[in-house]
Structure formats: structure tokens, C-alpha cells
């Protein structure tokens, strides 16, 4: 499966949400609504096409969350997808389900190996204002891990509260509370450092 994870598959669409139009090596865009029932029925070729289809998305998400261990996290996510695909009933939910698994496995890998890539956040402003990037990085370093997680999931991946709750395996209310506190703590730390 590792050859699947490191393949250079052409993509169309921007960012992770364009995942429903990822093409395979031969340029064919698989029809998930056709492949999913076939894969669930035991068709190995359909399962292989489905996994090849989502591998670039899974790798990209996992590497953004945990840079050093992104491929390990992606491997775990692909196994979880392979094992869980039989329980998925709605083909339209496939890509959201894959994204949630990828982020969840990357977070688990981070917690196990400890290197959450919150340092990606400063990269968003690096080109326009290098000093702001350093400042953001310093402020993030002072936040607790669980606050850094929710801020990163919101800012980098655009996950909404429900998606974060699914990815983190937490109740929605807990995610809302963490996000509120994380924003407040970031704001306070930002202004404290500026003073």
C-alpha cells in the first residue's frame, strides 16, 4: 500500500475539498457511487481504485497535521478506510468520511509521537509579513496542545465544528468550548506579546 501513498496522482480542484475529482494515473476519475458498492461486495479492483483515488488527499491531510510522521498517519488512515468502507452506507458521504478519518488518524499519530504541525499556520502569512509569522508561531507555542489542535484544524483545513468533533472524537459542545477558549487565549497572548 505504501506505493499507493507515494504515487504522484494528478489532481483537479483546489484543496482537500476538491477530492471528489481526483483522477487516477490513467486520467480516469472514478465514480464513487459505482465503486463503493462494488468494493463493499468484495471486488478487489474496485477497492484498489477507491484507495488510489483517495490516497493523495489522505497523504496531504496527514502531512499537514503531522509533518514528520505524515506517511505513518496516512498508512493508518488508509487501513482504517479499508477496514471501515464496508460499514459506509451513503456514497455521497464518502469524501467527508475519508477526510474525517485522515485528520483523526493524523491527530492520533501526533498524540502518540508528539509533533502537531501548528508551525504550518505561520506559513500562511510568511510571504506577506515574516514578522507576523514569527509572532504567530510564538503565540501558538504558548497555547496548550488541545487549543493549538482546534485552531489549526479551523485555520488550515477549514473544518467546521462538527467536522472537528468527528475528527477528534469529541462531543460537539467540547469542540465549541475549546475553540472559544483557544481563540480567547490566542487573542490574549497576541496582545500580551505585542505590549
Image (cartoon, grey):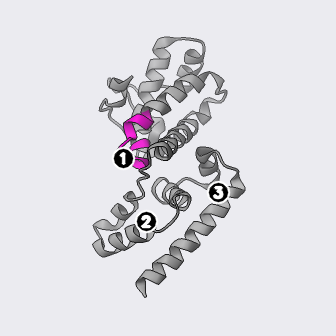
Which tag is nearer the camera, tag 2 or tag 1?
2
Residue 22 appears anywhere in the view: no
Q: Residue 175 shows which numbered tag?
A: 3
Real-space CA distance between mark 2 and mark 1, rounded to the nearest whole angstrom: 16 Å
Q: Are marks 3 and 2 in contact (CB under 8 Å)?
A: no
Residue at the disc numbered 1: 67
| Residue 112 rendering spot, x and y as whole percentages | 49, 42
Q: Residue 162 shows which numbered tag?
A: none
> Residue placed at 48% from the left, 60% from the top?
155
Residue range in magenta is: 62-74
Q: Identify the secondary structure beneath mark 2.
A: helix
Q: Quadrant of residue 194?
A: bottom left
Real-space CA distance between mark 3 and mark 1, rounded to the nearest whole angstrom: 23 Å
Please identify the quadrant where the C terminus is shown: bottom left
Query: Dot 1: within a 10 Å radius of its alpha carbon, few (fewer than 14), some, or many (20 or more) residues?
Result: many
Q: Quadrant of residue 9?
A: top left
The answer to whether residue 54 is above or below residue 60 is: above
The answer to whether residue 129 is above or below residue 159 is: below
In this view of the protein, which residue sits in the foreground, 60 or 15?
Answer: 60
Residue at the disc numbered 2: 141
Q: Identify the secondary structure beneath mark 1.
A: loop
In this view of the protein, which residue sits in the foreground, 24 or 84?
Answer: 84
Query: Dot 3: within a 10 Å radius of its alpha carbon, few (fewer than 14), some, or many (20 or more) residues?
Result: many
| Residue 102 rendering spot, x and y as whole percentages | 50, 39
Of mark 3 and mark 1, the one earlier in the sequence is 1
Q: Is residue 77 left or right of residue 184?
A: left
Looking at the image, which residue sits at the far bottom?
195
Of mark 2 and mark 1, the one earlier in the sequence is 1
Magenta segment: does it hold 63?
Answer: yes
Q: Is residue 100 left or right of residue 49?
A: right
> Residue placed at 41% from the left, 47% from the top?
66
**What secondary structure is the stretch in magenta mostly built from?**
helix
Amino acid at each position: 500500500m505504501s506505493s499507493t501513498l507515494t504515487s504522484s496522482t494528478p489532481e483537479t480542484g483546489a484543496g482537500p475539498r476538491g477530492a471528489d475529482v481526483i483522477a487516477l494515473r490513467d486520467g480516469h476519475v472514478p465514480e464513487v457511487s459505482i465503486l463503493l458498492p462494488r468494493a463493499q461486495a468484495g471486488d478487489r479492483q474496485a477497492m484498489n481504485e477507491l484507495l488510489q483515488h483517495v490516497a493523495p488527499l489522505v497523504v496531504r491531510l496527514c502531512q499537514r497535521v503531522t509533518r514528520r510522521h505524515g506517511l505513518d498517519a496516512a498508512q493508518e488512515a488508509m487501513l482504517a478506510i479499508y477496514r471501515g468502507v464496508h460499514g459506509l452506507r451513503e456514497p455521497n458521504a464518502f469524501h467527508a468520511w475519508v477526510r474525517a478519518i485522515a485528520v483523526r488518524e493524523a491527530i492520533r499519530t501526533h498524540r502518540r509521537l508528539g509533533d502537531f504541525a501548528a508551525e504550518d499556520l505561520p506559513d500562511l502569512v510568511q510571504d506577506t509579513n515574516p514578522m507576523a509569522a514569527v509572532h504567530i508561531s510564538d503565540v501558538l507555542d504558548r497555547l496548550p496542545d488541545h487549543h493549538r489542535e482546534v485552531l489549526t484544524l479551523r485555520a488550515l483545513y477549514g473544518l467546521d465544528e462538527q467536522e472537528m468533533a468527528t475528527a477528534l472524537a469529541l462531543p460537539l459542545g467540547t469542540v465549541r468550548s475549546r475553540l472559544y477558549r483557544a481563540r480567547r487565549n490566542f487573542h490574549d497572548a497576541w496582545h500580551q506579546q505585542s505590549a
